[in-house]
Image: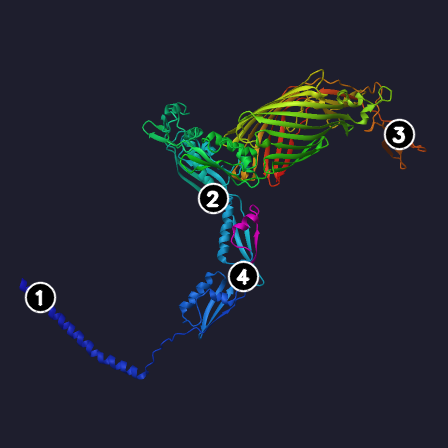
Amino acid sequence: MRGDNMTTTGSAIAGRRLALALMGGTILAGMPAVAVAQDAETATEAPAAPVVAQPQIIRSITITGSQRLEPNTILSYIRLRAGQEYSQAAADAALKDLYATELFSNASVRNENGNVIIEVDENPVINRIILEGNKRIKNDKILPEIKLSPRQIFTRSKVRADVARIIELYKRQGRFAATVEPKMVQLSQNRVDIVFEISEGPKSKVRQINIIGNEVFSDGKLRGEMVTKQARFTTFLSSNTSYDPDRLAFDQQKLRQFYLTEGYADFRVVSAVAELTPDKKDFIITYVVEEGERYNFGNVEVDSQIRDFNSDALASNLPMESGDPYDAKLVEDTVEQLSELAGSFGYAFADVQPRFGRNKEDLTMDLTFILNEAPRVYVERVDVNGNTLTQDKVLRREFRVSEGDAFSTIGINRTTNRIKSLGFFQENFEVEQREGSQPDRIILEANIQEQPTGELQLSAGFSSIESFILSASIRQRNFRGRGQTIGAGINYSRFSRSFNVSFTEPYLFDRNISTGIDIYRRDFNNFGFNNNNRVNSYEQSTTGFSVRVGVPLSEFMSLVGSYTFNIDDVTLGNRFFRDINGDGTQTCDPIQAGRFLCDAIGKRTSSILGATLSFNNLNSRFRPTRGESVSLSAEVAGLGGSVKYARMRASAAKYWNVFDNFIFSVTAEGGWIKGYGGDNVQLTDRFFLGEPQIRGFDIRGVGPRVFRQPIISDGNGGSIALTDRDQIQDDAIGGRSFYRGRAELEIPLGSGAQELGLRPSIFMDVGAVFNVERPQLLSSPFPNGTSVPVRDNDGNELFRQTVTNADGSTTVTNVTSPTAPDGSANTALTQVIASPFQEVFLGDSSKPRVTIGVGVNWNSPFGPFRIDFAHALSTVEGDDTKKFSFNVGTQF
């Protein structure tokens, strides 16, 4: 076998060798023919000399096409230089350098025997930027956000970037369908106008909010916890129906907070997706949630490592107990309360940490509040920064902790509220704390931002009785940076006029004693109507001054004493006087004026001592959101002067922060006055009620009043009394007792409305003024008795003169002479007689008048603005209602 194999292998090798030999012979046989052919071709063509590229040296560089830029400036942008070797790579690098400057729209490089020519086309210069179609976002909001501006070099990359930026601005407003089309208008001298044609599109609303995975709480309940709302007819005034990615993330947090407060500690939002509809008008938001199981509190303990606090005593006062539903918000509030408690004892850096123990078997949450050990802290230094006008002492005297005192959270909070109440600085002011030079030292900083404290107030209103009411006042609440208040005010209407100046020093001689003085003049005109003509009834003028001194009794309580001196003068027009007794003496005519007015006229002086005891822990005097105030005042007139009375007033107010930043407030006030020594309470000293104390009523529109109603014939031989308020004389005579109350809920709006300073509210006002001696009422003796002549304001009797004109018509005028002119045969004179009337006494009732309404405060660009719409639910016959009022002011 082996030998056979070897033989076979040798035969194969021999065969292969034979085949190779035959192939080699064939190739060798063909080689001479190929060689002969190549030799023949070589003999036919002469051999060419090899071409070798000689390097070219740049002899010169020429710049063409430039208009604004100097050639040397363009040459500085590239690396080509004369004397260098020219190559295509160097030319390409030069082009890249030129385009990188974004100064050129086109560039080329060519070499002509060592002379390099660079030809450029410069980008145009922007002449102006024009925005078209933008209504929702004004130019002053867009132009600062874009890169292009006049006198800059135009580049397409910047245009693209600006288009994207403008679209982003509209997306922030919820307008995802907005488009921007840039256009270029070519001008002379290589200038262009850039026009951005903007199509703002509709605001992209949230069409639907879907929630998947919730079983315990309904979709409606969870949507109610979110800030984002579905676009519906009932929410067309809401700003929260537009899509906002930041609001989407906030809503997820709101859902977590809600479930955690309900005890679902394992709750999580699996996903939140906002999908834009194909028409780009609306969004559909879908939340996928996992609720998990509900937990109850297990063992609740306190582990205090601070020796001044007993753990068991603290645990016994915790607001949660074992078995109560778990509430994460309650845990957060408890941590804050324990921190404040530690801070009130001087442990400023006390660290309170809740430690949780989750038991999934019995669904309980064990909780331990750990008060970590911390040193007692003392105030090392108090720094005041940022005040340029206000003197340091104005802030330092409001601090309730001083350098060297033990730190106190209560003192810091009170300091913050007192500085806020000054109204000189930003609303969000907080006393900041930072570590001192040692672990047991702390530095307090008042980093303030001063705001305008001057006020220029302009108010306007409209009354069916007074027409327009105007007032103006100017006040500086931080005069000379000393915290002093100085002001003056003027009020004017057909109903009243007044002027006052005032000055207040809160710290007399740098002691905690406040003083102040007011000087004023007030003129009040009452009027009625006679045949639709407005007729003055009586005038009341008050001139006087008031001096006050206040001292604090405690941190929240103070006592203020005052002395007031008034000169009151009540006068009537001459037409109300006549010679009743026939002795030539002009006496007030009750038929013309009314008995109660004749009794009120005259000049009198009032010397009044007063005292006010007040308690006030409101967190702000100007816009309180928390706290209460109570005051009780007493005044006695009669220590000199001609008026004797005793008067009492009481008022109270309380504010709550409810329903997540809703501000609810309740205020109440009442008063009583009584004459003594045989004196009755004069008209000028009584209480009056109406706008602005009770919205929904006119000025002095509530309470006792006397109507003088004209009597006319009914056409059937009888008579009727007119009741139209425009044709009767309406005199408010005030009361000796009053009360009023108000409940108001201020409604928070979205961030956009808050930035505008809008603060709407709903309110209910209630009150009454009553308890006055019934005045002696009169009725005109005409037509059954003696007629009453009508007089002008100077007391002259009036006569009606009728003149027949040439065309047969007649002209009627009132004159004061009973004698017709000589030769006036066509003149007839008749005495003007007063129309019959009756007086009616109305409104002396303690029945509460109730109004409800809505109002809006707006920090407008031209000053604080307030508008109210009110409707009276409960009135008494004779009350004068009014539905609308507003006022506006400004600050400097």
What number is the disc on residue 277? 2
What number is the disc on residue 124? 4
Amino acid type, mark 4: Pro
Residue 697 visible in the displayed image? no
* In magenta segment, residue 146: yes
Residue holding disc 3: 817
Residue holding disc 1: 8
Disc 1 residue crowd, few under 14, some 14–19, many 20+, Cα 10 Å: few
Q: Are marks 1 and 3 in contact (CB under 8 Å)?
A: no
Pick the residue in front: 179 or 194: 194
Pinpoint residue 392: horizontal percent, then vertical percent.
54, 37
* In magenta segment, residue 768: no
**Callout 4 secondary element:** loop
**Callout 3 secondary element:** loop
Q: CA distance from mark 1 to mark 2?
A: 85 Å
Amino acid type, mark 1: Thr
**Callout 1 secondary element:** helix
Pinpoint residue 818: horizontal percent, then vertical percent.
89, 28
Q: Which residues are magenta?
A: 125-149
Q: CA distance from mark 4 to mark 3?
A: 89 Å
Tell me the quarter of the image containing the C terminus. Answer: top right
Q: Earlier in the sequence, mark 4 or mark 2?
A: 4
Q: CA distance from mark 1 to mark 4?
A: 91 Å
Q: Are marks 1 and 2 in contact (CB under 8 Å)?
A: no
